[in-house]
Image: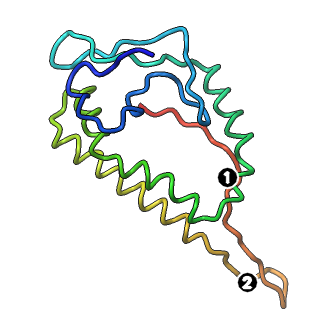
Amino acid sequence: MRNVAQISLNRVTRSDLLEIRIYIIGERIDVDTYLAAIAPAGDEKNVEVAHGDVMWVDRAVEAARAAFPAWRDLLPVERGTMPREWAALTQDQAVIMAAEQGKPQAKSLGKIAFGAAFLDWFAAERERCYSETIPSYLPGSQLLIKWQPIGVMAAIAP
């Protein structure tokens, strides 16, 4: 494994957040190509990150599809724990953001905390996924709407 802690990243308390390999469903994967992240305040290399291509997106989507039935069957409160755990890492994420963007750590912490608030809200939203009964187009009947996970999606984020 490559050492990525070259600047203030030594203040990160969870070293697994500095992992540079691709991560798919609990597995760390070495790849052939790594990209250098250059410090915005200078020309020195901060870290290297794994360079994934479409093949890795396809592999991640397939792994997510295989894991989906177990995820779907979790109670909503259990599905809400993962975004909350990620949101709890705000301090470490702020250190990483400051290192990769050259932003002051206080500003980075504000940005990360703003995003974490959304994660917490959506985690709680999973717990509020109640069914709904609505009037039907047929006399004497009603329709039931049940909110539940329906499948896998892929998104590419910076």
**Place of residue 70 in the rendered image (x, y in percent of width and height, measured from the top left):** 72, 51
Question: Dot 1: few (<14), some (14–19), or many (≥20) neighbours within 10 Å?
Answer: some
Q: Secondary structure at mark 1?
A: helix
Q: Residue at position x 59%, y 35% from top?
A: 26
Question: Dot 2: few (<14), some (14–19), or many (≥20) neighbours within 10 Å?
Answer: few
In this rendering, would 97 be left or right of 56?
left
**Place of residue 29 in the rendered image (x, y in percent of width and height, measured from the top left):** 57, 21
Disc 1 residue type (three-letter): Trp
Q: Residue at position x 74%, y 40% from top?
A: 66
31 relative to 148, above or below? above
**Place of residue 5 in the rendered image (x, y in percent of width and height, measured from the top left):** 29, 22
In this rendering, would 68 be left or right of 47?
right
In this view, the residue in front, 139 or 40, is: 40
In this rendering, would 136 be left or right of 158?
right
Q: Residue at position x 26%, y 39% from top?
A: 94
151 relative to 105, above or below? below
Residues at circles 1 and 2 in contact by the CB criterion of under 8 Å: no
138 relative to 82, above or below? below
Find residue 157 and report its image quarter. Answer: top left
Residue beneath disc 2:
135
Q: Secondary structure at mark 2?
A: strand
Q: How is the image coloured?
A: rainbow
Q: Residue at position x 83%, y 86% from top?
A: 141
Q: How far separated are the C-alphas under marks 1 and 2?
A: 31 Å
Which numbered disc covers residue 119?
none
In this view, the residue in front, 26 or 94, is: 26
**Place of residue 112 in the rendered image (x, y in percent of width and height, measured from the top left):** 30, 45
Disc 2 residue type (three-letter): Pro
Total marks in image: 2
Residue beneath disc 1:
71
9 relative to 121, above or below? above
